[in-house]
Image: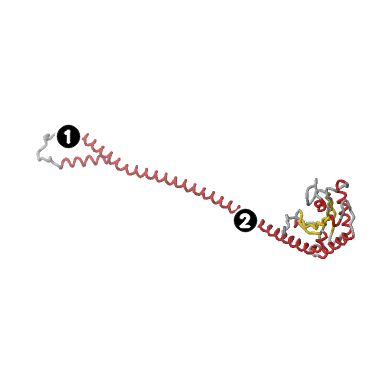
Amino acid sequence: MYVTYMVIQVRRQQKNRCPDLTGRASANPGGRNRSNHPVLEVRWAIGLGVALVIGGCGPRFSAQSACDAQESRLRALDDDVRDARDEIDKLKKKLRDEHLAAETERATRAQAFAEYEQRLAQLTELAARLRDLRTKLLPLASYGVSATVRLSRITIQLSGSAFFSPGSTTLGPEARRLLHEIASRLVADPTLAKRTFQVVGHADAAESATRDPWALSLSRARAVLAVLPPSTPDTVRWSVAALGTTDPIAGSLDRPSLDEQRRNRRIELVLQQAPEECLFFRDPDR
């Protein structure tokens, strides 16, 4: 209201000071000038005040809108930052999990490699032992004595034709001499002197027609064991097993040839594996 009053006063002063631009007296001397009408002056002042008020509030309204927009952008940025941090946390967790998995895989591979190296060393030792045993038994090869690998175990095979006649369990003098020679070579070997060998008897399919193959193969194994030196803690230890006709090394069980029968009718001295030697071992020379 004060502003409106001041505007009215200024308006009146301007009217009193400024004559008509034509220099002529007013057409309404002594009367009221239409432009000096109080109602018009009040309207004019109110309009001016409203314009001033609107003009003054405009910048404030614009600033408020800018502030609101800025706050909206800041909130959006805060949301983006929060989402980015969540994503970073997820990536860190994934990285830790992958690192842990990689460490576990590395440890597993290292253990597997160590076990492989250990087994390789054991297999290399077994191969060297087999070759050495073959060298020792080479003078007896002409009598049907050979060293080989069967079922991952070093085996000394004694041909049935040299040790037993078909259907027989009796050892001849030459067979006894060969068994003593084989035992002495095993005892003289420091790597084999305190090992356990299993004497395994075998029969061929033709013999089973007249005799029980299990009893026949067991009797042959016991006959060989009787010739070998006694088992002691400081010497080679022996055990006995019988497989009858269930483990042929040649031909088939139903119709074997004469040569196949001779090969299947045999005695085997099988080197028993220690627990740490239970590996899949093949003949490296075959």
Q: Give, as a three-letter code, the residue at label 1.
A: Arg
Coordinates of residue 225 in the picture (x, y in percent) = 87, 57
- Colour mapping used in the image: secondary structure
In this view of the protein, can residue 230 be seen by the observer? no
Residue at the spot x=90%, y=55% of the render?
Answer: 170
Residue at the spot x=47%, y=47% of the render?
Answer: 80
**Between tags 1 and 2, which lies in front?**
2
Of 169 and 51, which appears nearest the observer?
A: 169
Residue 271 horizontal side relative to residue 76, left or right? right
Residue marked by disc 2: 106
In this view of the protein, can residue 212 be seen by the observer? yes
Marked residue nearer the N-terminal end (1 or 2): 1
CA–CA distance in space, label 1 to label 2 = 104 Å
The mark total stands at 2
Determine contact: label 1, label 2, CB under 8 Å: no
Of 244 and 231, which appears nearest the observer?
A: 244
Coordinates of residue 43 in the picture (x, y in percent) = 24, 35
